[in-house]
Image: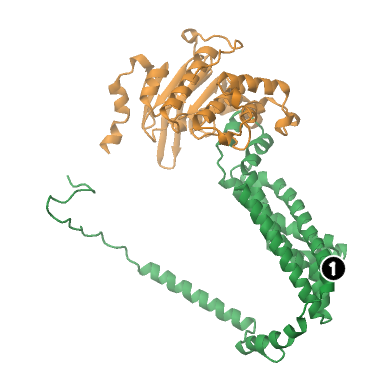
Chain colours: A orange, B green
Amino acid sequence: MPLQPALGSRSSPEPSRASALDAPLVIDGIHKRFGANQVLKGVGLKLDRGELLAVLGANGCGKSTLLRCAIRLLDPDAGSSRLGGRDLALLKGKELRLARREAAVVFQQIALVKRRSALDNVCCGALGRIPLRRSLTPAAFPHEVVQRATIALQRVGMLDRAWQPAQTLSGGQAQRVAIARAYCQQASVILADEPVSALDPRAAEEVMTLLGDLAHNDGLGVLTVLHQPDLALRHADRIVGMRVGEVVFDKPSPEVTPQEVDALYQHLRET
Amino acid sequence: METPFAAAAPGQAPVAPALPAKPSAGRRRLVNLGLGLLIAGLLVYSWIDTNASVSEFVNGFFGSKGLLRNVLPESLPPEVSQFWDGFRAAATTLAIAILSIAFGIVGSLAMLPLAARNITPSRPLYELARLIQAILRAIPELIMLLLFNVVLGFSPFAAVLALTVHGIGVKGKLFAEAVEEMDTSAVDALRVAGASRLQVFLHAVLPGVRNTLTALTLYRLDANFRSAVTLGAVGGGGIGFLIDNQLSVFQFKAVTTYMIVLVIVVLAVERISTELRTRLG
């Protein structure tokens, strides 16, 4: 997929100089239990600007739960998540809502409003920054928001389908529109929960390339949960391996060995 | 190792393995017996309490003063001159149904953000909204109309209000259930984007369930029309009122005319409603 040139509005990434304080997302010691099932056992990780971080692990190892706890879509039992320097555990109500704007989420299911156009869907990414009276209908969205959404659609190569209803887009196209919406949100972090699970290999490759491009050219921190180790090894800068609610490795992708990846899924074969 | 899909040895017919022991059906049999007795008891009670009688049933239809031998000959042919009056009155009944649906939609949508479990801001508010809807549903439209008749006098608008109030209870529940069954991934995406509850409602919830709500509304339109006919007979106006009037003075031929009009209009409303719902997919 030919990517449009990156916008110059964001600072270029310097992950090597980033410290834990500068990192847009720092998760520390997250515990989460559902009934008798301890899903997360003190998980911690740091996401830097300009970095594409992939989380690998078998079904049920806690990857998606971690992602939801990171932005308090689920409340963790213990531990903290600092987003944009603010500890989300200390916030509630409107403060939490506004703090969460720093993270945009791309879901596994195509989380678009199906009957609305691609452009309207992308504009909705900016809802957290639009006053209520200017957001009662899509026609009332401020001009700047529509412009930003147009740029975002161009960024993901979907400008020519701006007026197409979301329900008529293919899986790959819809996921790119969802990424444009995340981009329009002007967040510093994109969290993607298995964004390519429902896509064919080519569309999956395009979406991963796009996420990498947003990290490397726009300086966003991108954390993606994946089920495809090959995609993670090809596109991610760093890989976190999880097994039964714990991080078992966290290292740059070139250093991850096939045996380490294999070990993440070992217990599935044993059962 | 034995596997679930182990093949038979070459040249040998596969032998069916022994099934695991079937769970005992004793408890289920007891439950079924209990349910059967309960239903039989309810039927007997209803028969006695309503003074039901086979002979009265037969006399009502086939006796010398029954419907077929007494009323039917008096009802034919229909009074053609009454057709126009019938259609005028049916238009009033339809207007009652349409206006009450419109008011009902406004009331139901206003309660929707509280009444759907997956978007409500708090559990107590959800319970309160559902309780109010249950109470509104529990009071029949006819009783509502009698109450409004006391306040407003006999008028079609009293029927509109009666249907509206009951409809908020019915549509409110149906709408809330539609929202609870919707895919909430778009809702989550906008919540994370920092959208307020109202923004999420306007841009993810409503567009997500718009077609379902429209289909439910159209379905309720023909139900409301039939209810409006009934309410007409107790002062709500419209064709129900005309039928009741003509029955009270034994003008069965005019009643037949109105019944024909009624069937035509009900079938037309049902047909239009079904057609529109089909197009909505």
Q: Nearer the viewer, residue A92 or A48?
A: A48
Relative to B62, is A168 on the left or the right?
left
Residue with the most extreme left position: B11
The amino acid sitting under disc 1 is Asp
Q: Residue sitting at 40 percent across and 36 percent down?
A: A38
Q: Which residue is mark 1?
A: B85
Q: Is residue A179 in sight in this rendering?
A: yes
Q: Residue sitting at 58 percent across and 46 percent down?
A: B180
Q: Nearer the viewer, residue A229 or A118?
A: A118
Q: Nearer the viewer, residue B279 or B100?
A: B279
**Residue B37 placement (x, y as % from top left):** 48, 76
Relative to B88, is B274 on the left or the right?
left
Crowding at dot 1, Cα within 10 Å, few <14 / some 14-19 / many 20+, comes out as some
Instruction: Identify the secondary structure beneath mark 1.
Output: helix
Rendered view: B181 above or below A15: below
Q: Residue sitting at 37 percent across and 19 percent down?
A: A233
Q: Nearer the viewer, residue A25 or A124?
A: A124
Q: Is residue A247 in sight in this rendering?
A: no
Task: Specify the quadrant of the image occupied by residue A96.
Answer: top right
Exactly how many numbered labels are in the figure?
Answer: 1
Rendered view: B65 above or below B162: below
Q: Chain of mark 1?
A: B
Quadrant of the drawing holding the C terminus of chain A: top left
**Residue B142 placement (x, y as % from top left):** 75, 67
Task: Specify the quadrant of the image occupied by residue B252.
Answer: bottom right
**Residue B262 placement (x, y as % from top left):** 74, 68
Residue with the most extreme right position: B153
Relative to B231, is A96 on the left or the right?
left
**Residue B30 placement (x, y as % from top left):** 40, 71
